[in-house]
Amino acid sequence: MQETKPSLDVKALFSVTLLAGEILLSSGAEIYRVEDTIHRLLRLSGIEAAESFVTPTCIIMTLRDPDSDTLTTLRRVTDREHNLARVAQVNKVARALCDNKISLEEASGTLEEIKQSKGYPEWAMMLLLFFLPVCFYMLFGGQDIASGLICLVTGTWLALIRKVMIRTSLVRFFHDLIRAAGVAFLASVMTRIFSADSNTNLIIISSIMPLVPGVSITTAIRDLLHGDYQSGTARGVEAFIIATAVAVGVGAGLFLFRMIP
Amino acid sequence: MDLHILVLIGGFLTAAGAALLFQVPVRQAMLCGGIGVLASFLNLLVSRGSEATVLSTFAASLLVAVLSHAAARIVKMPVTVFLIPCIFPFVPGAGMFHIVYSLIESRPADATMYFFSTMEFAGAIALAIFTVDTIFKKRVKVHTKCT
């Protein structure tokens, strides 16, 4: 156990820890990584009584100092997206802090920079979404060139709708629904226009792969097996909602196509 | 044979693409692509070149998890950075589509069947990851120490 370091400002440490935890959680890190990081950082204060409780939507942490007040805070985390670069960077900062390689002020500054960092530019994301369906089509054993080109069309839809959706403040559910509906409809229409024999189902499956919540399902089961039942069920429900949105979207798209005589 | 090469290329591109979509730095994303190729090769091998089965998905996920842990140790980054993008190509999106499609075609029995097979695929992936997690045992039991 580490000795109490009087030089360490407990309150500053507390806020740095909260910031680190918040960035980790909002970037899609696993629950136990967030809790582990918080514990490691809080233990730097030399106070043993540090507790944290993390769910996918909030962080509660407390530090009971017998000599002074008890510090407790709650931070609500609303926007979550996978940004694994941030997870890696915060992990690095936390490690350096634990090894006393950087000061608390430096850590705080670096964390703020990480929080502000933008990541890849928007056009790169759109380009990725443009190409991902055709990549999935290849992975699933598709070899028809015409179908591959149709995948590029659905990819264009995914990329364009991302651009539009960022501006509108639509609920995530409808966002996914509209994307999936467009994909199913476009794939069906294009198949009818160009080549009657190409496999529409495979095109649709390849194109909805970037939308399906496979990662959430997997993380949910992983959390459950780890004993984090709170986050396991929460992520499971999140996955279920996204899956429903995509499914209803595909259904709507196919239904719309049937309406065309 | 040409078809299989296409599948392997697809394995690289989807894993690397997913990594970039999740903001992983370019060099690590290429590593993810490499893991993706090996995993899709194993997937092909176990399923004998046809569609993925639960067993082949389990094998591929096992390989992904082992390689991700290894890569994480080598470049000193969290396992998540490799694990999430590389698992991405194997998640049961097709099963989900078939559930809805069967419902639209008014075949509820098929929908139920696809529902259970989708859960099997998801379970196989989770089990594979969890097995490897347990072997590497990175998790520190913080709760027992701090009370």
Image (spheres, coloured by chain):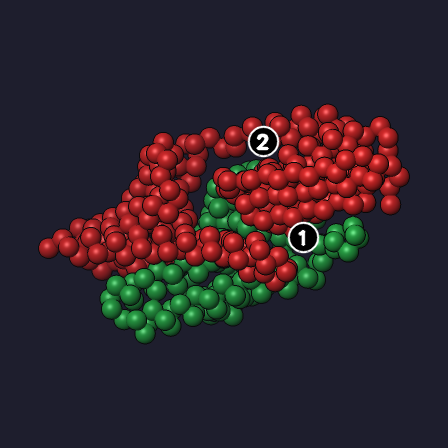
Chain colours: A red, B green
The residue that appears at 41% across and 32% down in the rendered structure is: A123
Q: Quadrant of residue A27?
A: top right
2 and 1 marks in contact (CB < 8 Å):
no
Residue B85: image x %, image y %?
53, 49
Apparent side of residue A185 relative to residue A116 in the rendered image (left or right): left
Parent chain of label 1? B
The residue that appears at 56% across and 29% down in the rendered structure is: A117
Disc 2 and disc 1 on one polypeptide chain? no
Q: In what quadrant of the picture does the N terminus of chain B appear?
A: bottom left
Mark 1 Cα shell of 10 Å, populated few (<14), some (14-19), many (≥20): some
**Frontmost residue, A249 versus A232:** A232
Query: Residue B70 bears which disc, if any?
Result: 1
Looking at this view, name the residue that lies furthest to the bottom: B109
Residue B91, can we see it? yes
The residue that appears at 52% across and 32% down in the rendered structure is: A119
Q: Could you give the CA–CA distance between mark 2 and mark 1, rounded to whole angstroms?
A: 28 Å
- Mark 2 — residue? A115
Residue B31: image x %, image y %?
58, 46
Height in image: A225 above or below A64? below
* Type of amino acid at the residue the image marks with label 2: Lys
